[in-house]
Amino acid sequence: MKYMIIIYGNQELWESFSPEEAQRNIVEQDAFNRKYAETGELLGAYGTADAGQAKTVRVRNGLPAVTDGPYLESKEYLASWYLLEVDDEQRALDLAAEIPFASVGAVEVWPIPHEAPGNKL
């Protein structure tokens, strides 16, 4: 079964880390990524740019309208996501608990019950 792991960013939280803490977080996350890529359970890990670099597209009357960034009502934004393929939900939860960010924020685990034909992952 595939699961999507979602981490939401918060600029204030990122800025609260000392340079040493930030570097340690990167090293720990890289170790997690390598470990579970080797087991085949981590299909992909993707970090997003900050919310200021995002665009929103809406089509109205057949014409696309592009605006800067998402409209955020909160301080949090989608910062990264992971795609896992594991035997069951408990394994997905166990891996999510090992993500370094889980110790300072929340990590969401979403089952992926449907896939479009032709997906590469």
Image (cartoon, rainbow, N blue to C red):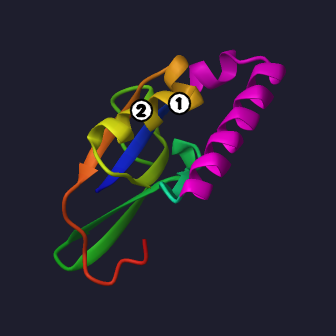
Disc number at residue 94?
2
> Image height check: is 90 above or below 63?
above
Q: Is residue 10 visible from the viewing direction of this image?
A: no
- Name the residue that disc number 1 marks: 98
Residue 82: x %, y % from top left: 47, 50
Crowdedness near tag 2: few (<14), some (14–19) or many (≥20) residues, C-alpha within 10 Å: few
Residue 22: x %, y % from top left: 74, 27
Residue contact at pointers 2 and 1, CB within 8 angstroms: yes
User: Residue at the left extreme?
Assistant: 61
Disc number at residue 111?
none
* Amino acid type at image mark 2: Asp
The residue closer to the viewer here, 1 or 57, is 1
The residue closer to the viewer here, 20 or 48, is 20
* Amino acid type at image mark 1: Glu
The magenta span reads: 11-39
- Quadrant that contains the N terminus: bottom left
Q: Is residue 20 visible from the viewing direction of this image?
A: yes
Residue 18: x %, y % from top left: 78, 17
